[in-house]
Image: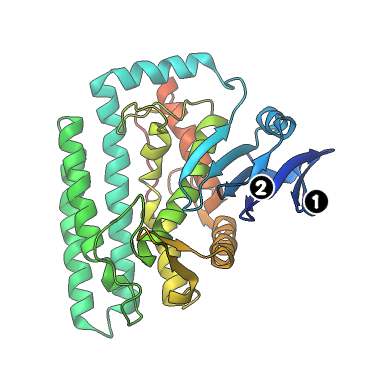
Amino acid sequence: MRKHLNTLYVTLDDSYLQQDGESVAVRHAKETKLRVPLHNLDGIVTFGWSIGCSPQLMATCSRQGVTLSFCDGHGRFQATAQGFSPGNVLLRRTQYRAADDPDSSLAIARHCVAAKLANSRQVLLRGARDHGTEKPDRHAALTTAAAHLAHRIEAALTATDLDALRGVEGDGADTYFQAFNHLLTIDGPTFRFTTRSRRPPLDPINALLSFLYSLLAHDLRSACEASGLDAAVGFLHRDRPGRAGLALDLMEEFRAVIADRLALTLINRRQLTSADFVTQETGAVTLKEDSRKTVLVSWQERKAAELRHPFLDEKTTWGLLPHLQARLLARHLRGDLDAYPAFLLK
């Protein structure tokens, strides 16, 4: 089983990554700012428009299974360094056949969407339990939204085709985000959620969510590739050039319980304030560089936290969950499991 290793995040513009023996060196202005042994890393992620990397380091990362991803200043994924496709070609062929078969695709996608709705519901119920006693209106709004999501879970599991399933998923997401403000315990307009905005995010809370989702997408893409699956061929998210469809499928299970919960923690504990964001002339809102470091430290701490996997009944870490779910999907595709057991928070 894969070990939980660190991810190196590089946010310093105009820096250059190169191989230094068995380490990666981060150089800036002709100085080495950081050197990290590659065997301690399972991923490297850069954030910025002017961060370079040597071909030698790209090749070594591909060979050693260290996922190297490049994101822009907003945290949007741009490219990755990848060598020859690893893994079992028979598994990939099975994945392609399942993706081409509407019934097989629907069976897997149902579990991904149902798990997303169930985990979102758990986040709402936890918010009602932890913060709802002070304000009855908040408790009522959260529990009402959670009850609606319970019905949507049933609808997801009985959806007759992928378009219907996407409709259920969209309706559930609307319900969840309409109740999102009730999960915030601070006052003031900075972190009031109105609607989900992307490319670019137009307010601080969307900027924070988009940044966390980009981190999560990197981890899911890495987990798919490490398990021998093709991250580009999904079942709910269909093929589109440049899109990691399977990584997005698996990501649905984790959005609320990993990314959203961390965003709520950072906001409710006032670890982030309005001063941590900047609005560009275009209206796009981004995290400041020092603020990104605050988020990245919390992200790494979150990934290192332990929990018990509900299906495997084994202790693991949040950081390893994407790898476990990718391997469970591979076992299902091989015929070892009757259905894909999506992750459900308990």
Q: Which mark is residue 90?
A: none
Q: Position of residue 273 (x, y in %)?
A: 45, 76
Q: Is residue 38 left or right of residue 200?
A: right
Outermost residue to the front:
281
Numbered disc total: 2
Mark 2 Cα-neighbour bin, 10 Å: few <14, some 14–19, many ≥20: some
Residue type marked 1: Lys
Locate the C terminus by quadrant.
bottom left
User: In this view of the protein, which residue sits in the foreground, 117 or 236?
Assistant: 236
**Residue labelled with disc 2:** 5
Q: In the rendered view, would you say 181 is above or below 39?
A: below
Q: Position of residue 70 (x, y in %)?
A: 56, 42
Query: Does label 2 or label 1 sit earlier along the sequence?
Result: 2
Per the image, label 1 sits on a secondary structure element best described as loop
Per the image, label 2 sits on a secondary structure element best described as loop
Nearest to viewer (mark 2 / mark 1)? 1
Locate the N terminus by quadrant.
top right
Q: Position of residue 40 (x, y in %)?
A: 73, 46
Q: Is residue 168 left or right of residue 233?
A: left
Who's the residue at 54% across and 37% down the image?
A: 222
Residue type marked 2: Leu
CA separation in Å, label 2 and label 1: 29 Å
User: In this view of the protein, which residue sits in the foreground, 297 or 272?
Assistant: 272
**Residue labelled with disc 1:** 30
Question: Where, by quadrant of the figure, is residue 279 drawn?
Answer: bottom left
Instruction: Answer yes or no: is residue 200 visible.
Output: yes
